[in-house]
Image (cartoon, rainbow, N blue to C red):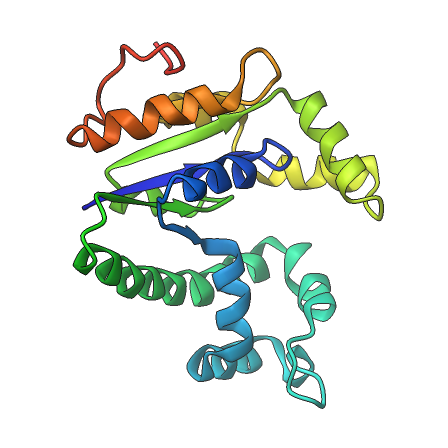
Amino acid sequence: MLLIGITGGIGSGKSVVARVFAALGVPVYDSDSRAKWLMAHDPALREQLTAAFGLATYDAAGQLDRAYLARVAFNNPTQLAWLNELVHPRVGADFAAWASQQAAAGQPYVLKEAALLFEANIDRGLDAVITVWAPAAMRQARVLRRDPQRSAADVQAIMARQLDDDEKVRRATYVVYNDDSQLVLPQVLALDAAIRRGGEVAEKSLDFTKT
């Protein structure tokens, strides 16, 4: 079974593209959602987070205080690196267990969706990576429509923490363009067919792949 990553900058539409793959029957592992679940429910990780960031990491009801953790970690590179060092290995182990179940079920390939796939070096354990691309201005406009609580400065700060789009494209095996220049569905159908034909993930002849 092939392990395929799918990533893209905020507002690129990677989750939308992942849902198209899921509609085709491809199992999709949402790393960001699973990370949040593990932070809330994994006993060992909860203990590590409390030790690292204080008792206020979880409220009186035992719920993860995301706002507190964001204030403590996301604006401090050292603290953010420490948070990632704690969370990413747990997500990796969770994905490995999930992928084993999918392989046992006879799936030809699975997708691992992750916003920081390259930044966290997650791509090293994958057979191929799909980058979903859209221009920065379009991505920012999408996020501002989707998340009215965010300001333009908020979105730009998030984008600044993510790998440059050109570098994401350079590192990708395939690029799905979600910039309104072409339809997404035919791109996904062609890529799904190529992978199902026998894992031809190195094929570069498809119209939507990078050259």
Farthest front residue in view: 24
Left or right of residue 112, residue 144 in this image: right
Which of the 4 quarters of the picture holds residue 69?
bottom right
Of 198 and 68, which appears nearest the observer? 198
Left or right of residue 188, residue 149 in this image: right
Left or right of residue 174, residue 197 in this image: left
The x, y position of residue 200, in whole percent, is 19, 26
Q: Is the residue 120 above or below the residue 43 in the image? A: above
Which of the 4 quarters of the picture holds residue 57?
bottom right
Residue at horizontal 38%, vertical 67%?
90
Of 194 and 168, which appears nearest the observer? 194
Q: Is residue 36 visible?
A: yes
The x, y position of residue 80, in whole percent, is 57, 58
The x, y position of residue 149, in whole percent, is 84, 48
Q: Is residue 118 visible?
A: no
Residue at horizontal 59%, vertical 31%?
12
Residue at horizontal 60%, vertical 40%?
161
The x, y position of residue 92, in whole percent, is 34, 60
Residue at horizontal 59%, vertical 22%?
134
